[in-house]
Amino acid sequence: MNGVAGPTVAMTLVRILLLGTLAASGLVLVVRCTKEMRSVGARGVAAPTAVDVLIGFVTNFLDTLGIGSFATTTAAFRIFRLVPDELIPGTLIAGLALPVVTEALLFISAVDVDPWQMTALIVVCVIGGWIGAGIVASLSRSAVQLGIGCALLVAAVFMVLGMLGRVPGGGTALALTPWAFVLALVINFALGALLTLGVGNYAPSLVVFSFLGMDPKAAFPIMMGSGAFVATIAGVRFVTARRVHWRVAVGLTCGGIPGVVGAVWFVKSLPLAALRLLVLIVVVYASATLLRAGIRTSADLPFTGASR
């Protein structure tokens, strides 16, 4: 049976609980960020530039269309030289967290999916994100460069698979079989950890859940909820570790929320194929520059250290 027992009532209750918790986690992040920004010194935090805000708007606009924001934002950081490489993960997560929360609140629709499996999958993803954020926040500059460079290559692979129509079409199940559910838990944990390196979870989640036989539509509440929760929880950890470029992060948030809302109105009129191709080119370029920088930094480390 592909259905879910009591889907309407259960999903309604679980959805209310998840969205309420998500809103609360977003509020916690806002409070933590505000406290941290006030403690940076008398000079405070510089106001975001027009470029910072524009990047937030465009990348989150694209994210709402399913193109993704993590890889594109990282690419923009590299092209415009906005953020030191070692601060990219924290700035990315903290700056995009509230736009991602906005996206989840707007786009988690009334889709029938096993509420308990969805909750468990989101929880393990958050645990993976929390652990991953702690590891990434302590990495050296060269390790971050190499890690993000590889992560962008992974993102590019999924982009190519989607453009070629090679992403599994999926089945019709609204709940995973026991063995598939166990496998999905392990994979979603890993995706949560990878999120902290800037690997968006939407594309790989859709591939995994479709491959395991789930209706692709039923995967959306899971992957959107996972991404939003990890962004807020991991964001708090990066903020606490002071691995955030505040001016840029604030700019991403200020531009990102309007970008998400704007995409709702314009989603049907954009040439997505051309946009995806452009994004792919930019992401591959950013990956190449990061990997090259990481290799050079690693080679110079015994002599000059990891300073910029």
Image: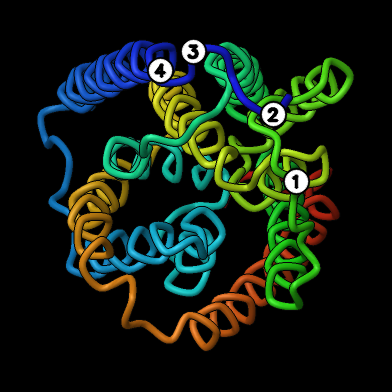
Q: Which residue is found at the position 73% from the left and 61% from the top?
A: 158
Kind of residue sitting beneath label 1: Gly
Q: Which residue is mark 3?
A: 6
Up-down: is 169 above or below 113?
A: below
Q: Position of residue 137 (x, y in %)?
A: 58, 27
- Amino acid of disc 3: Gly
Asked if marks 1 and 3 touch (Cβ < 8 Å), the reply is: no
Residue at image coords 45%, 25%: 229
Image coordinates of residue 282 in percent, x first then y, are: 58, 77
Disc 1 is placed on an element classified as loop
Cα distance between the residues tagged 4 and 3: 41 Å
Q: Is residue 134 left or right of residue 167?
A: left
Spatial CA distance of label 1 from label 3 is 21 Å
Question: Above or below — where is 180 with respect to 271?
Answer: above
Q: Earlier in the sequence, mark 2 or mark 4?
A: 2
Residue 281 visible within the image: yes
User: Which quarter of the figure has residue 35?
Assistant: top left
Residue 187 badge: none
Q: Is residue 139 left or right of residue 250?
A: right
Q: Relative to 220, is 35 above or below?
A: above
